């Protein structure tokens, strides 16, 4: 997905920022729509179909 921006955060090194984002466990994947709204939050590793479906929904 060419327009996909991936940001990886080291929650151990930035615990306050992780708490601000509501990240309670790792890994946590969060997908935001272009307008900044959270579309998907998956604690643990999301399945590929779930991830692709969420990405397709925000790509429109």
Image (tube, rainbow, N blue to C red):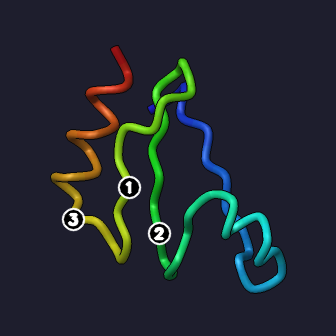
Q: Which residue is mark 3?
A: 47
Q: Residue at x 16, y 53 (%)?
A: 49
Secondary structure category for the residue under label 2? strand
Residue 38's image quarter? Answer: top left
Callout in the foreground (3, 1) = 1
**Mark pair 3, 1: CA separation:** 12 Å
**Mark pair 1, 2: CA separation:** 7 Å
Q: Looking at the picture, how far across and down is residue 17, in whole percent?
A: 77, 64
Dot 3 crowding, Cα within 10 Å, few <14, some 14–19, many 20+: few
Q: Looking at the picture, how far across and down is residue 20, in whole percent?
A: 69, 60
Compared with residue 21, is residue 59 higher up or lower down, i.e. above or below? above
Q: Which residue is mark 2?
A: 28
Q: Is label 3 in contact with label 1 (beta carbons under 8 Å)?
A: no
Label whose residue precedes the other's in the sequence (1 or 2): 2
Is the C terminus in the top left, top right, bottom left or bottom right quadrant?
top left
Q: Residue at x 71, y 77 (%)?
A: 11
Compared with residue 17, is residue 25 higher up or lower down, i.e. above or below? below
Label whose residue precedes the other's in the sequence (3 or 2): 2
Compared with residue 46, is residue 44 higher up or lower down, i.e. above or below? below
Furthest residue toward bottom: 12
Q: Residue at x 21, y 65 (%)?
A: 47
- Is residue 17 toward the left or the right of residue 32 in the image? right
Q: Residue at x 52, y 77 (%)?
A: 24
Secondary structure category for the residue under label 1? strand
**Mark pair 3, 2: CA separation:** 12 Å
Q: Is label 3 in contact with label 2 (beta carbons under 8 Å)?
A: no
Q: Which residue is mark 1?
A: 41
Q: Looking at the picture, how far across and down is residue 29, in whole percent?
A: 45, 60
Dot 1 crowding, Cα within 10 Å, few <14, some 14–19, many 20+: some
Closer to the camera in the image, 58 or 4: 58
């Amino acid at each position: 997905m060419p327009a996909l921006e991936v940001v990886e955060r080291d929650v151990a090194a930035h615990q306050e920022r992780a708490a601000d984002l509501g990240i309670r466990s790792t890994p946590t994947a969060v997908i935001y729509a272009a307008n900044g709204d959270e579309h998907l939050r998956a604690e643990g590793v999301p399945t590929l179909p779930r991830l692709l479906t969420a990405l397709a929904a925000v790509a429109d």
